[in-house]
Image (cartoon, rainbow, N blue to C red):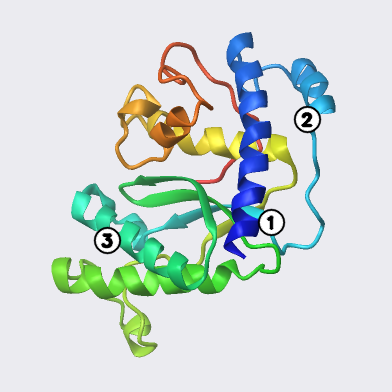
Amino acid sequence: MCCVIAIARHNLHSRLRSVLTFFARSGVGVGSSEALTQRVWGQFMRYRRTDAAGASYFFTVVTFRRQPIFAETRAVEMLERAIQRVQGRRPFVLEAQVVLPDHLHALWTLPEDDSDYATRWRLIKEAFTREYVPAFGLVWHDERRRARGEQTVWQRRYWEHLIRDDRDFIAHLEYIHLNPVRHGLVSAPRDWLHSTFLKWVANGSYDLTWGADAPVSLPAWAGRE
């Protein structure tokens, strides 16, 4: 299973590097010119299967009442450990992620025979909460949640979006890496520590100055806060 994921990821990244290089040389983002985008994606478009198994997803996960719990670096490290533990039990590819003080965005690819992202998120939230609460305590107390055995760490629901094609993938990839800039936390994606941006720079998909030296336009439909 892991070999299948690795091969699929290599093929995906090869295509994405080609497309991202084209946009970088053109000086535009994936959403900057609709006419240009249509021409490029006529060459690179590859639709994913209509069933969800083996697909990629974009997620927005929010803390309870937007508490800025991830302003603490230790809390971000706890989250990273929780994700790694769950990946060990239920593999998936963490394509991209950014963790902001009160929410996070992530882009996952699931194994070919698997569509169960819900269990993975439940396990990640539970693992994080078990480590976080003894260390930091709870700011909010909700009696209804307590009666159900729930902690006031995470918002109960989250947003998920099934990635339809490569253009959709790149739009959400760029949304993730631009998010700290859009929130006014930094002036360039490279300056935000809790992001996978530098990993994508290292594999040659982005230039280090991307998102800083020129504005990047995203499609209006990309992402969700």
Say if 215 sits above or below 191 in the image. above
Circle 2/circle 1 CB separation < 8 Å: no
Residue 221 found in image quarter: top right
Please state if 48 lies on the left or on the right of 174 as rendered.
Answer: right
The amino acid sitting under disc 3 is Met
Residue at 79% in and 62% down = 51
User: Which residue corresponds to mark 1?
Assistant: 55
Residue 83 found in image quarter: bottom left
> From mark 2 to mark 3, how far is it between C-alphas?
38 Å
Give the numbered dot on residue 103: none
User: Which residue corresponds to mark 3?
Assistant: 78
Please state if 190 lies on the left or on the right of 224 as rendered.
Answer: left
User: Which residue corresponds to mark 2?
Assistant: 44
SS for callout 1 = loop
Lower position in the chain sequence, tag 2 or tag 3: 2
Lower position in the chain sequence, tag 2 or tag 1: 2
Residue at 66% in and 49% down = 8
Q: Nearer the viewer, mark 2 or mark 3?
A: 2
Please state if 224 lies on the left or on the right of 219 as rendered.
Answer: left
